[in-house]
């Protein structure tokens, strides 16, 4: 299961709610990772919006929970707007709130993305010989995210692949590629020896710097063309 909530509000549409948060990342003296607040918001938005889109929804609203103070608000907004521009999304409303009564020693941000999904829109694949796999981008975490930006799967690539036929996408989070594969196919049980790829399948992908693509064999050329240099083949040995 994805890290989302699905709320059906009529027979034709559902709301998809996805979220992310970050702590001790920002510009306060006691933060563990020091980066601009635009970057903090961009990557929190990235995680939530990827989960929302992967679930088949079109994002319609973003809610920002800011515990960094009043001054960073505009910078945080710019990070969200940067992500929306990369996705080519317009008309997405942004709202939120700032904790201004008390000052925290470390930065903290929470972010929610709400999307609208057609009830019948579903992309799920059974595990079979007709299915292929790939990782798009590298799993990165902490300071690697800032040092290896050229290895991060672009949101524009993620969005384009999400609209391809016979394709399912799955963002990789802090538990790594192998853990996500076992969520995609809950009736299977994969271990590290069964998965062959050039990246560490147990490593955290931090703010979803990479994602898994599951696709029908006929879509191989199309997925490779869209992903370009970010395409990394992944093979799973059957028991």
Image (tube, rainbow, N blue to C red):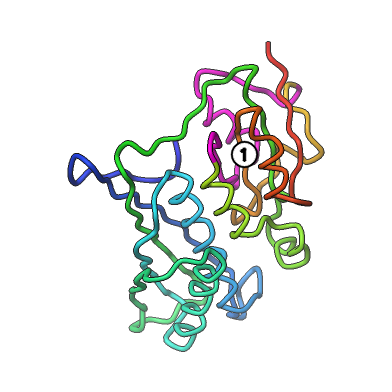
Q: Position of residue 21 (x, y in %)?
A: 47, 60
Q: Height in image: 237 above or below 23?
A: above
Residue drawn where x is 53% and y is 38% of the image: 165
Q: Height in image: 181 above or below 113?
A: above
Residue 170 is inside the magenta segment: yes
Q: Residue furthest bottom?
A: 71
Q: Height in image: 214 above or below 222?
A: above
Which residue carries the number 1 mark? Answer: 213
User: As rendered, which of 12 and 155 lies closer to the eye?
Assistant: 12
Segment tinted magenta in the rendering: 165-193
Q: Position of residue 201 (x, y in %)?
A: 71, 37
Q: Give the quadrant of residue 169.
A: top right
Q: Is residue 183 left or right of residue 63?
A: right
Check disc 1: other Cα within 10 Å, few if <14, some if 14-19, many if 20+.
many
Q: Is residue 12 left or right of residue 79?
A: left
Q: Height in image: 163 above or below 47?
A: above
Query: Where is the N terminus found, in terms of image quarters?
Result: top left
Residue drawn where x is 31% and y is 44% of the image: 118
Residue drawn where x is 62% and y is 25% of the image: 131
């Amino acid at each position: 299961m994805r890290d989302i909530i699905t709320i059906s509000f009529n027979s034709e549409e559902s709301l998809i709610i996805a979220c992310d948060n970050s702590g001790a990342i920002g510009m306060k003296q006691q933060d563990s990772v020091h980066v601009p607040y635009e970057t903090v918001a961009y990557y929190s938005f990235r995680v939530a919006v990827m989960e929302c889109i992967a679930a088949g929804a079109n994002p319609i609203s973003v809610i920002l929970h800011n515990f960094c103070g009043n001054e960073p608000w505009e910078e945080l907004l710019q990070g969200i707007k940067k992500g929306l521009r990369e996705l080519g999304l317009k008309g997405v409303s942004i709202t939120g709130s700032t904790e201004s009564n008390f000052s925290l020693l470390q930065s903290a941000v929470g972010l929610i993305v709400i999307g609208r999904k057609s009830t019948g829109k579903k992309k799920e694949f059974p595990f079979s010989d007709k299915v292929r796999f790939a990782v798009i981008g590298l799993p990165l975490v902490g300071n690697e995210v800032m040092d290896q930006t050229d290895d991060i799967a672009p949101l524009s690539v993620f969005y384009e692949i999400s609209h391809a036929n016979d394709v399912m996408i799955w963002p990789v989070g802090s538990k790594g590629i192998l853990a996500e594969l076992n969520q995609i196919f809950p009736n299977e049980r994969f271990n590290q020896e069964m998965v062959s790829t050039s990246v560490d399948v147990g490593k955290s992908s931090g703010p979803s710097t990479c994602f898994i693509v599951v696709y029908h064999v006929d879509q191989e050329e199309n997925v490779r063309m869209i992903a370009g240099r970010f395409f990394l083949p992944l093979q799973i040995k059957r028991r």
